Amino acid sequence: MGKSAFERRVADNEAIALAKRLRVSPQKLNLVASTIRGKDCGAAVASLTFSQRRISKAVKVLLESAIANAENNHQLDIDRLFVAEATVGKSLVMKRWKARARGRVGRIEKPFSNLRIVVREREEVV
């Protein structure tokens, strides 16, 4: 008896990292995620290091976590890794209000986002 084995959601040559509830809108986070999609991991880390966007620091930490997962958990070669997927999703939205004229209310929404990064090892060119 007991639980059945957990099926792996990614292939054998891939590693994954997730970040939930990042305090930025999904639209803004997708702008940063689109800059690293398809790039080699070294180039992606370099572009995030010098990015002017506030959330790029958190994306860089998550990418480094995915690289570390690939190296330590799945024994992949970090020199051949590239960012296969960087998907952004909506999380919760905090709703606040601001007093406006004549007793009315102005609604303020503070969105959160989820980010999923998958790094894949390139095939050897013979």
Image (cartoon, rainbow, N blue to C red):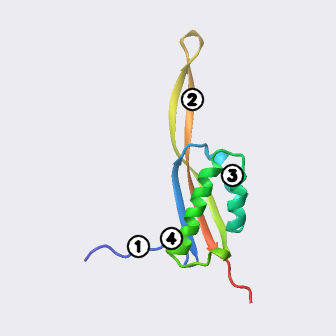
Tell which circle, 1 or 2, labels the residue nearer the N-terminal end: 1
Neighbours of disc 2 within 10 Å: few (<14), some (14-19), many (20+)? few
Depth check: give the residue in front, 41 or 115.
41
Q: Residue furthest left?
A: 1
Foreground tag (3 vs 1)? 3
Tell which circle, 4 or 2, labels the residue nearer the N-terminal end: 4
List the residue tagged with mark 1. 6
Q: Residue furthest top?
A: 102
Give the Cα separation between the discs numbered 4 and 1: 9 Å
Label 3 sits on a secondary structure element that is helix
The reply, left or right, for residue 54 in relation to residue 16 is right
Query: Residue 9 placed where, x, y %?
Result: 50, 70
Q: Which mark is drawn over residue 87?
A: none
List the residue tagged with mark 3. 32
| Quadrant assignment for the N terminus | bottom left
Q: Are marks 4 and 2 in contact (CB under 8 Å)?
A: no
Q: Amino acid at mark 3?
A: Val
Residue at 27 percent across and 74 percent down: it is: 2
Depth check: give the residue in front, 3 or 84.
84
Q: Amino acid at mark 2?
A: Ile
| Quadrant assignment for the C terminus | bottom right
Foreground tag (4 vs 3)? 3
Q: Are marks 3 and 1 in contact (CB under 8 Å)?
A: no
Label 2 sits on a secondary structure element that is strand
List the residue tagged with mark 4. 9
Residue at 31 percent across and 73 percent down: it is: 3
Neighbours of disc 3 within 10 Å: few (<14), some (14-19), many (20+)? some
Q: Amino acid at mark 4?
A: Arg
Tell which circle, 3 or 1, labels the residue nearer the N-terminal end: 1
Give the Cα separation between the discs numbered 3 and 1: 32 Å
List the residue tagged with mark 2. 108
